[in-house]
Structures are given as structure tokens and as C-alpha cells.
Amino acid sequence: MAPSAQRYLRFLVEAFDTQCGRFRNFRLVDGSWVPGEASEDCQGRAMHALGDAIATAADAAFVDTATDLFERALPGT
């Protein structure tokens, strides 16, 4: 698994707001998230990326993490 794929999945895991079931869009230099509701486009791009990861990744743990996140985010779409 490419280190960049792991980094991108970690970003999506951290970007997921469990309170609203959606992905946050922007992060500040200090690592905090910009407040406010993320765009529909942001949610769509995250879901698309997770779907691609689930369909193409060979690493089972990676696919499990992506699948879990996809399923948790699906109601927010």
C-alpha cells in the first residue's frame, strides 16, 4: 500500500464529523478544522474516493477502514 493512500485515508477518517455524519472540508495549519458545514461537493468527493479505495485496494485492513467510514457517512449524503 502506497504511503500516500494511507495518508489520504487517515485524512478522511479525521475529517469525518461523527456528530453530523459528514466530512469537513478545510483544515488549518494547526490541525483544527474550519467550522461550518462542508459543501455537498466535499461529501461527494470523499464518498467517491472511499468507493474507489474499497473497489481497488488489495490491503484488507485498508478496505475494512474505508468500508466502515463509507457506511457511517452514507446517511449524510
Image (spheres, rainbow, N blue to C red):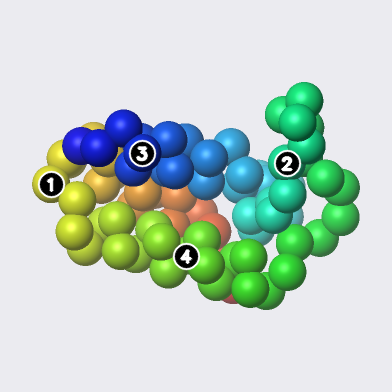
Mark 2 lies on residue: 27
Left or right for 56, reference 75: left
Question: Given the image, on which type of amino acid does mark 4 rest?
Answer: Met
Disc number for residue 4: 3
User: Picture coordinates of residue 10 (x, y %)?
Assistant: 47, 36
Question: Given the image, on which type of amino acid does mark 1 rest?
Answer: Ala
User: Picture coordinates of residue 16 (x, y %)?
Assistant: 61, 47
Question: Given the image, on which type of amino acid does mark 3 rest?
Answer: Ser
Disc number for residue 72: none
Q: Which of pointers 2 and 1 lies earlier in the amino acid sequence?
A: 2
Q: Is residue 52 above or below residue 29?
A: below
Q: Which of pointers 2 and 4 lies earlier in the amino acid sequence?
A: 2
Number of marks present in the image shown = 4
Quadrant the C terminus occupies: bottom right
Q: Residues within 10 Å of mark 1 (few under 14, many from 20)?
A: few
* Residue for point 42% across, 68% down: 48
**Marks 2 and 1, how far apart at CA:** 29 Å
Q: Which of pointers 4 and 1 lies earlier in the amino acid sequence?
A: 4
Question: Given the image, on which type of amino acid does mark 2 rest?
Answer: Arg
Q: Of tags 3 and 1, which is closer to the observer?
A: 3
Mark 1 lies on residue: 58
In-front residue for pair 46/61: 46
Disc number for residue 47: 4
